[in-house]
Amino acid sequence: MELNAQYTSLVAVGDSFTEGMSDLLPDGSYRGWADVLAARLAARSPGFRYANLAVRGKLIGQIVEEQVHVAAALRPDVITLVGGLNDTLRPKCDMAMVRARLEEAVERLAPACKVLILMHSPGRNGPVMERFRPRMEEVFALIDDLAARHGALVTDLYGAPSLADPRMWDVDRLHLTSEGHRRVAEAVWQTLGFPPESDWQTPMPESAPARWARRRVDDVRFARQHLLPWIGRRLTGRSSGDGRAGAHFDAGLGQAFWVTPEDGATPGPVTGWRRLDG
């Protein structure tokens, strides 16, 4: 596997983490680490193409059924696959099924690209992390095994204190801030063999802990705005991703499409993307 190469295409597969929540742009869309990584790769490769198929709330079975075959058909230079963590957060999680579907995804994606990137996802320090840690670590152990068997690369974010810092996470406590996404993009960039442009593992500056009253107000707001709606969706069998398609998937046509920098003739910073059809 050639690293630090001239990659000309990237497809991102996964759930809300790869879709880009909560890296919100002024127009209401999400950017996220995959978009940041794509822009950095495009800056050094004229004619670069990118497709983000990730959809919030998706379980690993849905990712395999809805995204994996689409990504494989595009045959890009690089595919990123992050999935399975939504499953581990469910009270009833069939870990045997999660393992089987992850293995199926890797087996189908690895031959379809030059480089397949898998990931140990980061986790926010706190009681939720501690409750589900054994399941997460089981998934990460499988990812390491699959990477070794199929020649994939692994970006390990799980053990990084910088990304476990609660200040790196949005108010919903499930999704990274813009700074968190930027650091993930840098970590994947380095996994691909490119020289570091920043130290994504640098801890955030020390700050005084929030007062007790402030923490309680934040807890109440979190419960009302995020936790209770999440529980409601679980009880009714709904998902935040119901009715949604990936950013670069045309649901009307039933197919993915590439985007490329608006001024893609020469390398340089990406100021916007345009759709490629056909």
Image: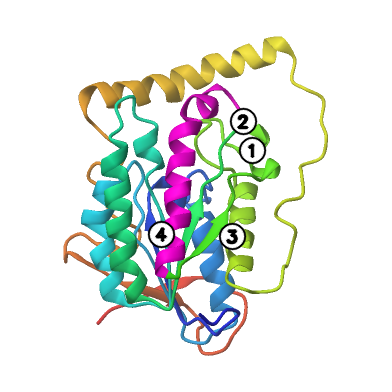
Where residue 255 appears, as percent x and y from the top left, is 21, 67
Q: Which residues are magenta?
A: 126-150
Measured in 3D between alpha carbons, the distance from the residue under mark 2 to the one under mark 4, in whole angstroms, is: 27 Å
Residue hosting label 1: 164
Measured in 3D between alpha carbons, the distance from the residue under mark 2 to the one under mark 1, in whole angstroms, is: 5 Å
Measured in 3D between alpha carbons, the distance from the residue under mark 4 to the one under mark 1, in whole angstroms, is: 25 Å
153 or 229: which is nearer to us? 153
> Three-letter amino acid code at disc 2?
Asn
Of the image marks 4 and 1, the number of the one nearer the N terminus: 4
Name the residue at the bottom extreme. Answer: 265
The secondary element bearing badge 2 is classed as: loop
Residue hosting label 4: 146
Of the image marks 2 and 4, the number of the one nearer the N terminus: 2
Of the image marks 3 and 2, the number of the one nearer the N terminus: 2
Residue 244 visible to the viewer: no
140 or 192: which is nearer to us? 140
